[in-house]
Amino acid sequence: MTELLDPHGEHAAALEHEYNARVAIPEHVDILAGWQDRSAAFRARAGGRLDIRCVGRGRPAVDYFTAGGIRAPLLIYARGGYWQRGDRKDYSFLAAPFVARGVNVALVGYDLCPAVTLGDIVEQLRVACAWLWRQAATLGHDRGRIYIGGHSAGAHLAAVMLATEWPALDNSLPLGLLRGGFAVSGVYDLSPLRATSINDLVGLDADAARRWSPLWMIPRDGVSLLLAAALAQAWRPVITASVQVPGANHFTVLESLADGQGLVYEHAWSLIAD
């Protein structure tokens, strides 16, 4: 453990390269700028209900895009950014292929570390999921067909949501609040992050790293999970597929979700359409 947390050790340097995608992939600047432009264009043509504030602790914000159908499925999307950067509006473009095929999409925002803790962010996502379940009739989606997806840190958050015992938080919530989801290029064991610069703002200690690692959580019975990377043997009973995207890196893998024809999208669509 001493070696793992030594910020000057060779092992720590290797972890920095492995987990800090922005350092390992310098072209991320242009990729993110492209996402922002595509997202702004989608919002301009799709409209949507933007900047809705959920009721509950932290009052997380939601951008909601409707497919126009009656009792459509809902996809909740949690963005990446290692819980310390970015904005949900940078990812609006990912809603386009789902809305085109009759799925409502809610992009959930959350406050950033170090102003809040990772535990606070998890709570904000839970508040948003519960609020969206309660608002199904008002917003026009089917509360029995709510799914969650995410990329990078958002994939971590999606996995935590799928392991959440909702009635234990509020006995008015059903155990099956979320029917399933997908997790793309996520981090599911947070302990190695403690030896990287990512933790400078996230501030995980050993207890928090274990508490919020999906690796050590028990997935809820009855959910279905699509992974664009392997999670853990303990989650295998709920994993419907583990997809590898040839030639993709941590950022470009999202193209396989965004283009409406990619491998990740087709698996995610099959999950929702089931």
Image (spheres, rainbow, N blue to C red):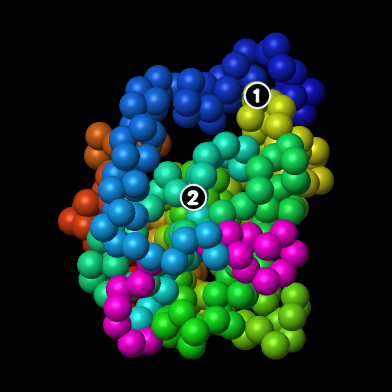
Q: Tell me the tag on residue 138.
A: none
Does residue 193 appear in this view? yes
Q: Position of residue 7 (x, y in %)?
A: 71, 17
- Mark 1: which amino acid? Ser
**Which residue is nearer to you in this view: 15 or 169?**
169
Tag 1 and tag 2, C-beta contact below 8 Å: no
**Which residue is nearer to you in this view: 253 or 129?**
129
Q: Position of residue 36 (x, y in %)?
A: 37, 40
Magenta-tinted stretch: 53-71
* Dot 2 alpha-carbon crowd within 10 angstroms: few under 14, some 14 to 19, many 20 or more: many
As drawn, is 239 to the left or to the right of 169?
A: left
Q: Secondary structure at mark 1?
A: loop
**In the image, is residue 235 above or below residue 195?**
below
Quadrant position of the C terminus in the picture: bottom left
Quadrant position of the N terminus in the picture: top right
**In the image, is residue 53 above or below residue 134?**
above
Does residue 213 appear in this view? no
Q: Residue at x 68, y 53 (%)?
A: 121
Mark 1 vs 2, N-terminal side: 2
- Mark 2: which amino acid? Arg
* Residue 63 counted in the magenta span: yes
Residue on which disc 2 sits: 88
Q: Secondary structure at mark 2?
A: helix
Q: Tell me the tag on residue 197.
A: 1
Q: Residue at x 74, y 53 (%)?
A: 119
Q: Residue at x 60, y 16 (%)?
A: 13
**In the image, is residue 260 above or below residue 179?**
above
